[in-house]
Structures are given as structure tokens and as C-alpha cells.
């Protein structure tokens, strides 16, 4: 079934039909900027990175135009991740002392890397719910990683970071527009999520086995803080769904952006609130955890997750009746089909 436009449904936060192929522009901007301004011959790892981006781009655009099964999207992500792990040896090979674990056996390293890439890719996909949110969070994260890669002299990754930021900035212009509004769709969210996921793995790889001019004392903790909002939102909605007796993969309106929308905030206000929360977490938590030993830093991060859960705890009749609303919508949809 053709889906060149996003049509409002029970869990949409928009009220009109909007084109959802903004991810095509993000892809073109990222690729053209890298090919034009990239620092010369591409190493094997970068070539495979771009190949992985292509895979996610094509699977995303197919899903935006012709709906595909979730397992096919997952398979595409596994293929893209495997290309990097085996072809470029880009993998997480250390736990940096978390749970007392340091160096990882190859098979565990491979599985953990693929799992990390898939989780981050889909976590980013899930926060794409209101105007500007996914793009602004992506710009912020790409900017931090771009700075880190620049300090440590990884020009290809710096170029990709800047290209991603520029593409997302251009997309924001239209995402916030009233007359020419466009969504990034799965094409954009899967692509951007995958790029950020690879940045995380490269970030950890530099700390574990590669030489660096600058490094963090607790890189794994820093990586989680950088992806705090997408990861926290994913964990939160999964827990809410399980608590309601539903599948964690089912769709609903329990994301962080829905919390603010229910409080009366409009789209740009919701995006601004979540963006500010993310920046505050960066500015406070990263210096704080860097001054601590790993166990204290770990529990500080857990404490931040708990604090967010307390602040953003669903309350009221709307939360208690969300399962009922979902069932009513499903029944109406089945009735219309008949």
C-alpha cells in the first residue's frame, strides 16, 4: 500500500496528511557533503560504513512507500551491522570494567556490537514523534561526536558528523514549516539512528584499542549519557507496555513527547523541553561521572534514569485507560475493514 504521506491515526501527534520522505534529503545531503568534502581516499571501514547507510536508506524508503514486515527491517539492520563488524573489525571489545568485565571474546563482542547498533538505531527511530525532536537530538549528539573525532584526528568521521548535522539542520527548516512541512519517515530515522550507533561503537573502539589524544575515564557511561533520551524513552515505553499487560513492541502514546503533549505543550515547546533536558544531562552528568570511579558513575547514571521515571511517570485516568483506548481503536479498525 502506497504511503508517500503520513496519514494521522490514533497515536499520531499531527492532524493532517504530511509527506514523509524527508529522509531522502538527509541521505542526499550526507552523501554529497562527504563525497565533496571528504579528506581523500576512503579507508575500508568508511566504505563499509557508507554501504551500511545505503542498506538502511533503501529499507527505510521501501517501508515509507510500501509497508514491509518488521523482521525484514531487522534483517537489514543485522546485515548492515555485520558488514562493519566482520568487514571493518569495528566492534565493542571491552566492557571497560562494568560488572568487572574488560576484554570480551570475539563472539560476545560481535553479538554485543550488533545488539548495540540495532538498539540505538531503533531507539532513535522511536523518538521521531513530534516536529524537530529527532533532528535536534541528532544534531546535538552528532556535534559532540564530531568534536571528539576532531580532537582525536579522525577526519572521515568528522566529515560525516558535520554532514549529518548540516543535513538535519536543512531538514529542520521544512519540518517546522507550516506550508511545506515534511517528515523524515523511516528513511531518515533509520539512517540517522544507524549513523549515530556507528559513532558510538567507534567512540568506544577508540577508547579500548586505538590511540587517542583525548579520552574519557568512563567511556561506556558517557556513551549512554550521549544517547540518554532515545535509550531512556525506549526503556520507559517498553516497561509501561509490559506493566499494562501488552507486548513491548505494540504501539501507543506513552513516549516522552506524548507526556508533554498531554500537558498542553505544542510541538516546538515539547521539542524544546526535551532538548533542554538532554543538554542539562550532558553538561551535568558527563563532568560529574568523569570525576567518579566506575561503580559510582554507573549508579549515578541509574539514578538519573530513576529521576526521569519519577518526573515523567504517567498519571491519571488517561494512563489507566490507555489499554482500553487501544482496544477500542483496534475494534473500530476491524469493523471498518469488514
Image (spheres, rainbow, N blue to C red):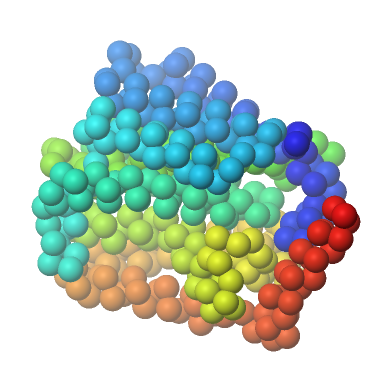
Q: Please, which residue is most extreme toward the front here?
A: 338
Relative height, residue 39 to residue 66 (above, below): above
**Residue 42 image offset from top left, x and y in percent:** 31, 17
Q: Picture quarter containing residue 249?
A: bottom right
Q: Picture quarter containing residue 1?
A: top right
Q: Is residue 112 visible?
A: yes
Question: Is 215 on the left or on the right of 164, as rendered?
Answer: left
Q: Is residue 150 visible?
A: no
**Residue 267 image offset from top left, x and y in percent:** 72, 58
Quarter of the C terminus within the rendering = bottom right
Residue at left offset 74%, top offset 77%: 324
Residue at left offset 79%, top offset 70%: 328
Q: Picture quarter containing residue 145?
A: top left
Number of disc labels: 0
Question: Is 234 on the left or on the right of 151, as rendered?
Answer: right
Relative height, residue 37 to residue 139 (above, below): above
Residue at left offset 59%, top offset 78%: 244
Residue at left offset 32%, top offset 30%: 83
Q: Nearer the viewer, residue 97 or 244?
A: 244
Question: Is 69 on the left or on the right of 260, as rendered?
Answer: left
Amino acid at each position: 500500500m502506497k504511503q508517500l504521506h503520513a496519514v494521522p491515526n490514533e497515536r499520531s501527534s499531527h492532524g493532517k496528511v504530511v509527506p514523509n520522505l524527508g529522509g531522502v534529503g538527509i541521505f542526499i545531503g550526507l552523501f554529497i557533503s562527504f563525497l565533496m568534502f571528504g579528506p581523500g581516499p576512503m579507508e575500508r571501514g568508511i566504505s563499509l560504513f557508507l554501504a551500511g547507510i545505503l542498506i538502511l536508506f533503501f529499507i527505510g524508503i521501501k517501508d515509507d512507500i510500501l509497508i514491509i514486515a518488521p523482521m525484514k527491517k531487522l534483517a537489514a539492520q543485522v546485515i548492515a551491522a555485520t558488514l562493519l563488524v566482520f568487514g571493518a573489525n569495528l566492534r565493542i571489545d571491552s566492557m571497560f570494567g562494568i560488572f568487572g568485565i574488560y576484554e570480551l571474546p570475539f563472539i560476545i563482542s560481535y553479538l554485543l556490537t550488533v545488539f548495540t547498533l540495532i538498539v540505538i538505531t531503533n531507539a532513535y527511530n522511536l523518538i521521531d514523534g513530534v516536529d524537530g525532536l529527532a533532528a535536534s537530538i541528532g544534531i546535538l549528539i552528532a556535534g559532540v561526536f564530531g568534536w571528539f573525532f576532531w580532537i582525536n584526528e579522525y577526519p572521515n568521521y568528522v566529515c560525516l558528523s558535520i554532514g549529518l548535522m548540516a543535513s538535519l539542520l536543512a531538514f529542520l527548516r521544512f519540518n517546522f514549516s507550516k506550508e511545506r512541512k515534511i517528515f523524515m519517515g523511516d528513511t531518515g530515522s533509520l539512517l540517522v539512528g544507524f549513523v549515530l550507533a556507528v559513532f558510538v561503537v567507534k567512540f568506544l573502539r577508540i577508547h579500548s584499542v586505538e590511540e587517542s589524544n583525548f579520552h574519557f575515564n568512563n567511556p561506556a557511561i558517557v556513551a549512554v549519557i550521549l544517547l540518554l533520551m532515545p535509550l531512556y524513552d525506549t526503556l520507559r515505553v517498553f516497561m509501561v507496555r509490559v506493566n499494562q499487560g501488552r507486548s513491548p513492541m505494540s504501539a501507543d502514546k506513552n513516549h516522552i513527547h506524548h507526556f508533554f503533549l498531554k500537558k498542553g505543550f505544542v510541538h516546538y515547546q515539547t521539542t524544546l523541553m526535551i532538548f533542554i533536558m538532554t543538554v542539562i544531562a550532558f553538561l551535568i552528568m558527563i563532568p560529574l561521572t568523569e570525576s567518579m570511579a566506575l561503580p559510582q558513575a554507573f549508579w549515578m547514571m541509574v539514578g538519573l534514569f530513576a529521576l526521569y521515571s519519577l518526573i515523567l511517570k504517567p498519571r491519571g485516568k488517561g494512563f489507566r485507560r490507555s489499554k482500553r483506548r487501544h482496544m477500542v481503536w483496534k475494534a473500530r479498525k476491524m469493523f471498518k475493514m469488514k
